[in-house]
Image (cartoon, grey):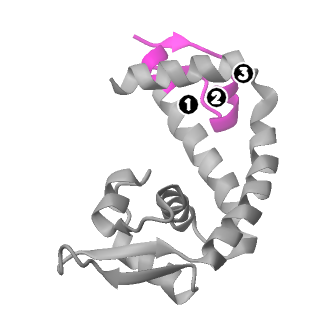
Amino acid sequence: MFHNLTGMEIGKEIKQSKFKNEHQKMLINILYTSSWLASKHATSLKPFGISQQQFNILRILRGQHPKPATVNLLIERMLDKNSNASRLVEKLRVKKLVERAVCSEDRRAVNVIITKKGLDLLTELDMNEDVFLNELKKLSVSEAEQINLLLDKMRD
């Protein structure tokens, strides 16, 4: 059964006036908004020469600092589960943002630790992120909390 949902914002954005139902509309809206946010985030990171996935790894490592993290821990905690963490770590190592070392407890594992250069870059990126997050303040704190609760409920 089709509902006429003309005049709705996502419909205007993608030039689609009808959706099968509200759940389909929600799915399209979430996917579209996710892509929109990812694009804005990637654009904000571009001047710093890192990708969103590299940024995610640096943030995980900062949270672990001064302890190292294994590549497996990075994989577990990454937002994008399809990322190749080993390849991303190597790119960050070449940029001198992280260091790699064989784990003394498990010779098969590799420890990764963020460097001072990596920490300094994140400090700079934190200021950049504040500008990015300001764009999201079109929503009130309570609206943001409500969205967070609903998204958590959907994944439950």
Location of mark 1 (residue): 29
Q: Do labels 2 and 3 touch, CB within 8 Å?
A: no
Q: Position of residue 71 (x, y in %)?
A: 32, 68
Location of mark 2 (residue): 10
* CA–CA distance in space, label 1 to label 3: 21 Å
Task: Select label 1 or label 3 by which is in front.
Answer: 3
For badge 3, the amino acid type reads Val
Q: Look at the image and tell me in which quarter the C terminus lies.
A: top left
* CA–CA distance in space, label 2 to label 3: 22 Å
Q: Secondary structure at mark 2?
A: helix
Query: Which mark identifies residue 127?
Result: none
Q: Position of residue 99 (x, y in %)?
A: 46, 82
Q: Residue at left 41%, top 19%? A: 153
Residue 126 placement, left or right of 88: right
Q: Residue at left 35%, top 83%? A: 101
For badge 2, the amino acid type reads Ile
Q: Secondary structure at mark 3?
A: helix
Q: Residue at left 51%, top 19%? A: 149
Q: Which residues are magenta?
A: 1-26
Res 106 quadrant in image: bottom left
Circle nearer the N terminus (2, 1): 2
Location of mark 3 (residue): 141
- Count neighbours of disc 2 (C-alpha within 10 A) and say few if under 14, some if 14 to 19, many if 20 or more: some
Q: Secondary structure at mark 1?
A: helix
